Image (tube, helix red, strand yellow):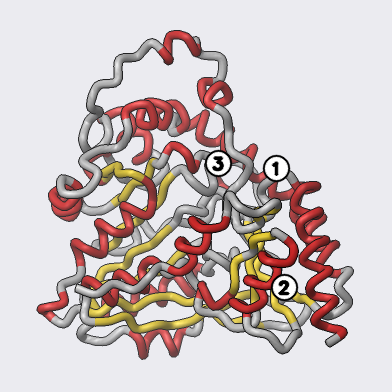
Amino acid sequence: MRIDTFRMERMQALYEYQVEYNLSESGVWPLTVAEVLDGRDLAEFAGQQLYYPEAEGSDVLRERIATWYPDASAGNVTVATGGSEVNHLTLWTLLDRSRGDRLAFMLPNYLQGWGLGRHYGAGTDTFRLRVGGDEGGRRWALDVDELRAAVTKRTRAVLVTNPNNPTGAVLTEDEMDAVVDAAQRVGAWVVADEIYRGAELQGDGESASTPTFWGRYDKVVVTSGLSKAFGLPGLRIGWAVAPPRLIGKLWRRHDYTSLSPAFLSERLARIVMAPARREAVLARTRRILRENLPRLESWIAEQEGLLTHVRPVAGAIATIRYALPIGSIALADRIRREQSVLIVPGKQFGLGRYFRVGFGYEIDHTLKGLARVEETLRQLARG
């Protein structure tokens, strides 16, 4: 079967280590192994024998993950190699082209699901977040009418990313209810990619976390992992939270892919997902984001109307609109070639004249890269 090239991931794979300034990162500055161990004996950890780990994650890790979701238990959790593998396993499990299954998919978004809906299913139908409100309260809001039109009797799953990538938007309670209502009307599953949950710009403690879709409907799959909000992309730990019967189906397919998470990653994830430690790690993430975002926003404001943005509610990414007569792919390519800076073009999320930059890494370094971006933008503005 044909599968679309995942253009954003291919671009990052080709160039993220070739440029001087990689502004395509979408998480926060990663923790070190010593920071994860948090005073535990590093030598003792290094002395562990590298057995095969438990195939779907240890009972300890799955129980600790479950504590982040109301009324979930270890039986509702399976662990795989990163959030991307979990999303893949989920859509592979739910969609069947021979039945004519279709995926309803939120845009803008990380387009993995869009491609997999076209590969495993009969096609992908889209609905959008759109910028609404006045200057004092602009936000990316769900187009509920478009959602309802996209969800038909052939829809097998409705996929949302909440908090959203690339906008940093968070659905309201009414919007979450609309997603559930649309899926429930046709008996479809809700697949909620919540990998940015925990990286909010407001609030403190466990109550600050974005509300989860888990528990709102009996056909919900939540996918997540340690790459974004937790600042641990190198561990490649992801998980699904779902009804036990579906967990068994995901595991059956996992046997044909990576088989299990990596042993050391699984053991480090146990430490991070202990509830008190989890909240400490997320507090670090929120501190980084709250310190860095105002400096990015100051740079945007200095561009004198050339750039505009809607403030993200969560996540380490900002989606910036530009007022120039050039497509986003061409703009990103030019900036990479001329300035050795990697940004992500809006087209790779289903947007028009936008680009995405990360602000979760060392902010002075980020601003030096943005100064180079500004140089190309000014050249284009002058014609």
Q: Residue at x 64, y 61 (%)?
A: 342
* Separation (CA) of disc 2 from disc 1: 21 Å
Q: How many labels does the image show?
A: 3
* Residue 186 visible, this angle: no
Task: Kindly identify which numbered label has been placed on residue 4.
Answer: none
Residue under the image location 49 percent in, 43 percent down: 233
In the displayed structure image, the side of residue 177 where residue 254 appears, left or right? left
Q: Name the residue under label 3.
A: 231
Q: Which of marks 2 and 3 is nearer the N terminus?
A: 3
Q: Of 126 and 88, which appears nearest the observer?
A: 88
Please rate how many residues cluster around mark 1, counting C-alpha atoms within 10 Å: few if below 14, some from 14 to 19, many from 20.
Answer: some
Query: The disc labelled 3 sits on which kind of residue?
Result: Gly
Tell me which residue sits at (70%, 68%) in the image: 335
Query: Mark 2–mark 3 contact, CB under 8 Å?
Result: no
Q: Which of 11 and 224 is in front in this view?
A: 11
Q: Which residue lies furthest to the left in this view?
A: 98
Secondary structure under badge 1? helix
Q: Is residue 356 above or below residue 105?
A: above
Quadrant of residue 46 within the rendered picture: top left
Q: Which of 376 and 251 is in front in this view?
A: 376
Q: In this view, does 259 lie to the left or right of 131?
A: left
Residue under label 2, please give it. Answer: 309
Q: Name the residue under label 1.
A: 287
Amino acid on which disc 2 is placed: His
Task: Note whether residue 309 is visible.
Answer: yes
Which comes sooner in the sequence, label 1 or label 3?
3
Look at 52% across and 55% down and name the residue there.
Answer: 210
Give, as a three-letter code, the residue at label 1. Answer: Arg
Which element is circle 3 on?
loop
Pinpoint residue 126: horizontal percent, then vertical percent: 40, 82
Q: Do the residues labelled 2 and 1 touch (CB within 8 Å)?
A: no
